[in-house]
Amino acid sequence: MQLSVHWVGCAALLSLLIVGEVWCACTEDNMQIEGGHYTLTKGLNASSMLVYHCPEGFYPYPSRRRVCLLTGTWSEMPRRSKPQTCRMVECPNPFVLMHGSVYPPQEKYFADNETTYECYSGYTLRGSARRVCLPNGKWSGSTPICSRDSGSDCADPGIPAGALRNGNSFGLDDKVKYSCTGNLFLVGSSVRVCLENGQWTGTEPACYYDYTYDTPLEVSEAFGSAIKGSLTTLEPTDDTQEGRKIRISKTGTLDIYIGVDISESIEEKYFNDARDTVAKLITKISSFPISPNYEVVFFSSEVFEVVNILDFLDGKVQLNVLKTKVESFKIGTGNTAGTDLNLVFMTFLERMALIKQRTGDDGFKEHRHVIILFTDGAYNMGGSPEPTVEKIKNMVYMDPNYKQKEPLRAEYLDIYIFAIGAQIFDDDLEPLTVGTGGNHYFRMKDIKKLQKTFDEIIDEDEVKGLCGLHKDYVTTEERENYPWAAQIVVQNEGRVMKCMGSLVTPMFILTAAHCFTFEDLPKHVTVDINDGQGRIKRVKNFFLHPKFNVSAKVNEGVKEFYDYDVALIQLTEFVKISTLVRPICIPCTQETSDALKLVGESTCAAQEQLLLKNMEKLTFLTRKGKWVDEKHVHAKLGDKRDECIQHALEAPGITAKKAEIPVTENFLCTGGRTPFRDHIACTGDSGGAVFKNYEHRTVQIGVVSWGSKNLCKGGGVVDSDENSRDFHINVFRVVPFLKSILGNDNQDDYAPLEFLKS
Ligand SMILES: *[C@@H]1O[C@H](CO)[C@@H](O)[C@H](O)[C@H]1NC(C)=O
Ligand SMILES: *[C@@H]1O[C@H](CO)[C@@H](O)[C@H](O)[C@H]1NC(C)=O
Ligand SMILES: *[C@@H]1O[C@H](CO)[C@@H](O)[C@H](O)[C@H]1NC(C)=O
């Protein structure tokens, strides 16, 4: 806390600075670090922070960072005897194993050093037999434990490296207590109790040096599984489809409070990263079919509110507005000199009190609260937040005895802390975490890494099959933007037809019927969809819409009639679902209602209303180079549609007098230049999904079918001219066909999709 003390002085003096005269600049003399380098947050100006950096596997010693004081000197100047250097990272002492031995014996273990573990005879090993000291100061794998069956209620919980354990009996209600030796710091449960079900309470503790950091992967696994608990436990038990449906119960409400420290304790550029990270977190949470209410604040000595949770409750703020607000938030001219951590908790406590006032005690019981805080824990104002955290517990648990024993409502409150920075005040921060179901305290060097971390949270088995999930930013894996996209080749004798398609279930691809001719057989069809298990998929069968008949209106002046131009291709095997390959959402399914967050009994009409408005911007894909590019169009509905479809009469092969003859109600019309210049489809685009992204899920609205003019020479992204029009099958109009195959529950080949009743 040495630093915080300085700041009290610094903050007070800073106000003098504004008045005028005081000036100070530090110098860079003697600030070098052997083996590393440093960065300055505000040059050599007062309150600038100098942060030391070392290569991986090393850490700065003795100081992590220094602050330029108003006196023109750096805080914590090194003593002559201790020059600033990069030291090798050590891992905690592995010689804590009971009933076994550790090789090789060393006084210290540095990054890349290995250890192996063996149990004495009569004992069996659980955990890792070989561990490597990682550059972040942790051992790889899991704690080795040598135990023998003693008939105890609980299994031996082991002793993590660097720890001491008090308590060696593992019967019901027995307690084990952990502490860390030397200057190590304990993260996790210091006390664990053996429960009736044979499990220990809490989470396995770990001993951290002050340079020990969690890797993004570790945070992703731990935070991911914990937050998913909050995001999914609102579901009533619903065992359809291997439990991969997540439903929000009608009464449960999730309130998420996010606080981000933007005080000068944190580097300036950190702010933008922090802001982006919060936006990312919200985005990721929004990919779950649950709609939490949010309170988002940035804080230093004051609280800067980005969104008030009460506005959320009142429906005054929608998710997209929240995201925009977060993304465009700028630190004003407010005072960012101090840090008042308590004030943040007080703000959250007040909001909870207001919610409780509105909903009444019974209503409040249905609210789960998740607080997520990003800070380095250095506060110099407002005092310790601990009493406020106790008040929050008291309010949520509704149990006066919560301190003596685990409260019944424990799962209604989680406080996660992401401790971030060059120097972290663990002793103050870690005790503020609250919650069951895994680690709630994470130590990270850099908030930027968290974006990736939050991203990986949804890439887990239980949600990866959800339709329409995709990444909406540039990634190295292009497929991740359109994981449902498929390219189709039909090759029969001399004829080669290339089409686009969309994965609608792990076994079916939706495309256009006109991609096939009468003579084509399944063996002539291949689907290119790279799921990491071979690009080219073989086809078991394909099904054209029974009403598709190109020559149906020859007598009415339509040489080629494309009504019902849809087909489904069934693969011989399921594709492997991952971030690279997953289905798109299609109209009138329950999963799409979940994706659109339509709660209760929803209808096709409700989906269509949400997704398809006049001039709705829609997208389809075209082959480009090795992969694809986007084409943007606007759906012309109502009056606009009448005008739009007239241009069908200009198409070659059409002599009909009325546009409604070739263009039935089943078509969407796009193209033209007014009011927006649309792109126009080319031959190879046929069968592709015309889609819309809604709340980060992709829903297919149409299937690219035919156009009035061929403006494409080589393909690619081509602008429409004034009169060129494209006609796409409106998928809402062909649902009975989709349902007859995808929703068929009289077969054992695949799990049927759940279609809405109406
Ligand atoms: C240092 O302070 C001066 C005067 O306020 C300012 O013009 C300059 O941009 C600051 N330098 C840095 C690197 O922040
Ligand atoms: C442990 O790591 C240190 C530092 O990299 C190295 O010098 C030493 O040889 C390693 N010891 C063993 C047994 O690998
Ligand atoms: C397609 O329509 C034409 C004209 O109505 C009809 O003669 C023909 O039998 C139809 N073909 C099929 C396969 O239904």
Image (cartoon, rainbow, N blue to C red):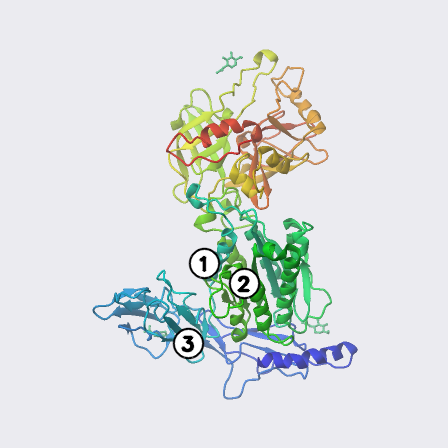
Q: Quadrant of residue 749?
A: top left
Identify the residue under disc 2: 397
| Sequence-wise first label, 2 or 3 | 3
Q: Is 747 located above or below residue 327 in the figure?
A: above
> Which residue is at a point 53% across and 59% down the rendered structure image?
412
Locate residue 150 relative to residue 62 in the image: left or right: left
- Residue at the right extreme, as displayed: 19
Identify the residue under disc 1: 221
**Element at badge 3?**
strand
Identify the residue under disc 3: 179
Q: How far apart are the two marked residues, 2 and 1, measured between alpha carbons? A: 27 Å
Q: Considering the image in quadrants, where does the N terminus appear?
A: bottom right
**Where is residue 247 drawn, in percent x and y?**
51, 46
Type of residue at label 1?
Glu
Mark 3 crowd level (few <14, some 14–19, many ≥20, 10 Å Cα): many
**Where is residue 449 drawn, in percent x and y?**
52, 61
Q: Considering the image in quadrants, where does the C terminus appear?
A: top right
